[in-house]
Image (spheres, grey):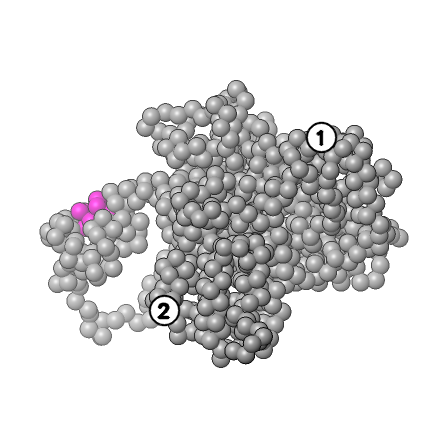
Amino acid sequence: MPDGAAAPALPGAELVARVRAYDPKADAEAISRAYEFAAHAHASQTRDNGDPYFTHPVEVAQILTGYRVDTNSIVTALLHDVVEDTSVTLADVEKRFGRDVARLVDGVTKLTRLELQSDRTKQAENFRKLVLAMSEDIRVLLVKLADRLHNMRTLRFVRDEQKRRRIAAETLEIYAPLAERIGMDAVKTELENLAFRELQPDACASILARIAFLRGEGADVIDRVIEDLKRLLDEHGIPAEVTGREKSPYSIWLKMHRRNVAFEQLSDIMAFRVVVGTVDECYRALGVVHAAYRVVPGRFKDYISTPKPNGYRSLHTGVILPDSSQKIEVQIRTREMHEVAECGVAAHWSYKEGIQPSAEAPKQYRWLRSLLEILEQASGPEEFLEHTKLEMFQDQVFCFTPKGDLITLPRGATPVNFAYAVHSEVGDSCVGAKVNGRIVPLRTELANGDQVEIVTARGHTPNPAWERFVVTGKARARIRRFVHAQMRAQNIEAGRTALVKAFRQEGVEGGAAVLEGVLKTFKQASVEDLQAAVGAGQIGAREVVLAAYPELRPTPRPASHVMPLSRARPKPAVPPQPGREPGRDGRAAIPISGLVAGMSIHFAGCCHPLPGDRIVGIVTTGKGVTIHTHDCPTLESFAATPERFLDVAWDTDGTPAQRHTGRLAVVTANETGALATLTNVIAKREGNIVNLKIVNRTPEFLEMLVDIEVRDLRHLGDIIAALRACSQIASVERARA
């Protein structure tokens, strides 16, 4: 090399520099080798937008540098697609970069094709693998989230619309909740907004337009509030950093949907963050804010004394601006809390001190252990996916044991959920509960701060009816496991009895050896499985006898003895299944459990019950059973005859999706195009208008009742949320008449 010539830059010098900026001890040589190795492996590949494929792993690694992860995580990010998309093997990776990197790459590789697809079982199985991989090393999830974030940023380049929507739905359904669970709020928010823009473009555009309108009306509101808060804190000797922002479009849409309110009714479109030095200053700053502004009742939350399950700590309060009566949210936290809020698990994971990440997970990530317990209890991958979503999607309530231990549960949890959260055996043996010293029914919903005492009895077993009101995946999986075991035992006994009778009628031997000889014929693993299948009606007892003794099969008649078609007996009518009302198209409607066989049912026109509603049945002379929602005002007229009430519930297992009618009370602007907007929004969300009645007309507004065929309560809720996002629609409520 000539004197004075610059040394050649290492491959990925910019990436190495970014890692070295926060970790001077990072292995620059390993990152450079991985950069060069991946660049060579992906050399001939391109992405949908025409860029070299290698830009993707580099961007994933760049995203991770923002969370100050370790060297092996950066190397894994660069290599995460080489085993899946090139000729490189896992053995090659281990030989060049070590066992730890190979294990991480293997964990990420197994998940690269996790997609929402028609094969639901495959998706559920892949999600099960994701939970197992991240429980062994959380860095697998960090790399996967960075990978998904970059894919979502470039989603617009995917030409196939169905594929784009599938990826976006999967992001919203799985990856955003996982990012929230490990405290990576910035990643969660960006994933949600990118997915929302793809899945609900009209609603997203409408909310953005309304935010822009508010911004135009009060362009300097954020700057003025920031200056005012800084001045107040300075006057009280509290050094602080104050920032302001608007809430994200998806979080606004979600609150409109959950709280059943219009955009204008939301109180926290704008949020302000106050970052101080110590916990003491957090509470002092809170006092300053409350002294200066009027407080919104019920909006104060102390996540410092009671952190969220993902480790999030902060004070939240809602106040009213004096000059505009506008409500805002103020979040107060320390710098350390802020780092954890933004980076989550990456802010303090133990591998930063050189300790194995799987050695001792922080307490706030015990939910991973909970997911593993669900995995053990669930009977199959689809059930696991269902229960896990229950764990991830719901808001939290914080309750205490009599000894003061904190138990975190999803919103809507009951004492049964609390019992299973304490221990599976406590849940199984639960017979009663005391909340704040008072005996309450087991279906009582718990509230923040409740002290719960579980009453147990030795030998008690789970009640199958609990499944109707539990909301945690762990409790539901445990109850289902018990119910399945109980049903299996009953089926085995019923099948054993039926087989003994069938063999005895033919006068032949039907012992265990005979049954083992026909297991392959019926694709059963054991004699007990065969007996259970017979008991459940899946296999006929006589079929088993004839399979064991083929010589007992009747000899076919000659063709001349075949009965002419015109003289053949008509097939007997199949009796209706209990609780199944025939649909208009001939299919069975969604069944109702809890009815006597042969009862006819119909759905009340006063409350229009939908799958997902809590329901009751009323026995009506000459009509059978009428299904009402549990809060239907009509039920008051039956209070004097409680014997007419039936405890019923929706039972959708294994039945085709049947449409039900829900009724909405809608108020729209009385202007050109308002009705077209209404019908288009409903049609885009796969609703079918079956009746529309205008009940009042004024120069400004139209009031109407709209009957819509939907799949279930959630489907109707999606339509309501989409309608509320439209500027021409003043209000939308579910009608009860």
Residue at the extreme right: 699
> Whole-percent x and y of residue 357?
43, 48
Query: Which quadrant of the figure contains the C terminus?
Result: top right
- The residue where tag 1 is placed is 284
Measuring 13% from the left and 49% from the top, which residue is drawn there? 511
The Cα–Cα distance between marks 1 and 2, rounded to whole angstroms, is 57 Å
| Magenta region, residue range | 494-502
Residue at figure coordinates x 46%, y 51% from the top left: 138
Q: Could you tell me which residue is drawn at 28 percent across and 52 percent down?
A: 533
Verify CB contact (< 8 Å) between mark 1 and mark 2.
no
Q: Residue at x 67, y 46 (%)?
A: 255
Give the amino acid at mark 2. Asp
Work out whether residue 481 or residue 546 is closer to the camera in this orientation and state it.
481
Q: Of helix, strand and loop, which mostly describes the magenta segment? A: helix
Q: Give the x, y percent position of residue 435.
A: 52, 24
Q: Amino acid at mark 1?
A: Arg
Residue 441's disc is none
